[in-house]
Image (cartoon, rainbow, N blue to C red):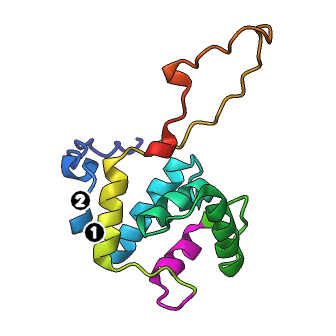
Amino acid sequence: KPAAPPPKTAAPAPNLAAAVPPKPAELGRDELIGAIFQDLGAFCKSPGRATVKAMQRFMTLVGFEGSDNEWRAEYQSLCKEWKQDALQGFEQAAFSKMVNDKSEMGVFCSDGELRNILGKLLAVPPKPPAKQKTRKRTEPASEPAKKPKVAEIDDSQFQ
């Protein structure tokens, strides 16, 4: 006679509290860094990497005030210093080392600064800047150019 199957038990009730993300104040240092990095990956739609725009978003929050051209040069320098592929972006391990490094090479952030940064990142949904669309001129040169529609204006520079 075959053995009877084990009795079915009810699945445990889901932990609804776990579905709510913890507040920055509730996170330890490594969790803060991981949450920031995760947000940066979502921002650039590249999980596991923080690309040039995502890193610019982070570095602006820690005090970088240069132009986009100055940022690109700074990013290239950071990638070289931390042995990261500039096209692929920073890996989490290198990012974590960078924000934990108190030397001249590092971008050390205290726990309080990390909490503040994460709070600011979470306050603004991770939406990367829209790529600028190039429009071909279709009207004759003698007619004035049409004004762009409001939806076509890239307002990411104002954020």
Residue 134: x percent and y percent? 72, 28
Per the image, label 1 sits on a secondary structure element best described as loop
Between 114 and 139, the one nearer to me in the picture: 139
Question: Given the image, on which type of amino acid does mark 1 rest?
Answer: Leu
Q: Residue furthest right?
A: 141
Between 30 and 88, the one nearer to me in the picture: 88
Q: Residues within 10 Å of mark 1 (few under 14, many from 20)?
A: some
Query: Which residue appears at 50% of the width and 49% of the height?
Result: 42
Q: Is residue 51 visible?
A: no
Q: Is residue 93 magenta?
A: yes
Residue 113: x percent and y percent? 32, 73
Position of residue 16 in the picture relative to residue 31 (left or right): left
> In the rendered view, would you say 149 is above or below 31?
above
Q: Is residue 8 visible?
A: yes
Quarter of the view holding residue 9 = top left
Query: Which residue appears at 40% of the width and 61% of the height?
Result: 35
Query: Which residue appears at 27% of the width and 41% of the height?
Result: 8
Quickly name the residue at label 1.
27
Residue 147: x percent and y percent? 58, 17
Question: Given the image, on which type of amino acid does mark 2 rest?
Answer: Lys
Region in magenta: 91-104
Q: Considering the whole magenta stretch, tell me its main secondary structure.
A: helix
> In the rendered view, would you say 83 is above or below 123?
below
Residues at circles 1 and 2 in contact by the CB criterion of under 8 Å: yes
> In the rendered view, would you say 79 is above or below 23?
below
In 3D space, how far apart are the residues under numbered discs 1 and 2 (Cα atoms)? 7 Å
Quickly name the residue at label 2.
23
Query: Which residue appears at 52% of the width and 80% of the height?
Result: 97
